[in-house]
Image (cartoon, helix red, strand yellow):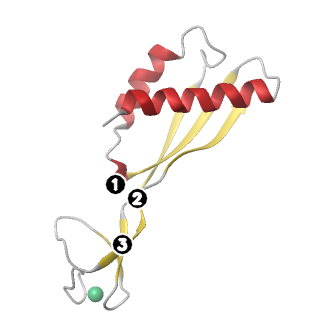
Amino acid sequence: MHELTITQNILNVALEHARGAGAKKVGRINLVIGEMTGIVSESVQFYFNFIKEGTLAEEASLFFNIVPARFRCRACGTPFELKTDTSCPHCKASDMEVLSGRELFVESIEVD
Ligand SMILES: [Zn+2]
């Protein structure tokens, strides 16, 4: 995945927010990341620790809200989480829509 690029974007969003609010520093950044994005939160944290140096977010912490991948069967309407099987657990149809798991955004930023 492109965790470095993503982390850079997260930092940019936080810094813009802090500047817009006239804040001296960023305290906490709450992220929402869907399971299906394949983004590894440990990698984001790892990169963040490097790129935040010398910015308003130098003392900021990241908090990850991981959204599970959920689907709904188009044949019978049953919602389910996809594990190893790639079909509906109720009727075995393989036509499904994604309900959640593709999220990737900054939910909120706390500044001082
Ligand atoms: Zn079904």
Residue 71 — which label?
A: 3
| Numbered disc 2: secondary structure | loop
Left or right of 84 on screen, residue 52: right
Which residue appears farthest toward the top when viewing the image? 54
Q: Are marks 2 and 1 in contact (CB under 8 Å)?
A: yes
22 relative position to 29: left or right? right
Pointer 3: residues within 10 angstroms few (<14), some, or many (20+)? many
C-alpha gap between disc 2 and disc 1: 5 Å
Q: Ligand 1 is located in which of the four quadrants?
A: bottom left
Q: Residue at x 70, y 33 (%)?
A: 110
Say what secondary structure mark 1 lies in: helix
Q: Is residue 24 above or below residue 30?
A: above
The residues tagged by marks 2 and 3 sit, at their Cα atoms, a distance apart of: 9 Å
Please tell me which residue lies in front, 94 or 112: 94
- The image quarter in which residue 52 lies: top right
Question: Which quadrant of the structure image shows residue 6?
Answer: top left
- Vertical order, 81 against 74 (above or below): above
Sequence-earlier tag: 2 or 3? 3
Circle 3 SS class:
strand
**Residue 72, can we see it?**
yes
Which residue is at 59% across, 27% downward? Answer: 12
Q: Amino acid at mark 1?
A: Met
Which residue position is annotated with label 1?
36
Horizontal side, residue 69 vs residue 82: left or right: right
Q: Which residue is mark 2?
A: 101
How far is disc 3 from disc 1 in space, using C-alphas? 11 Å
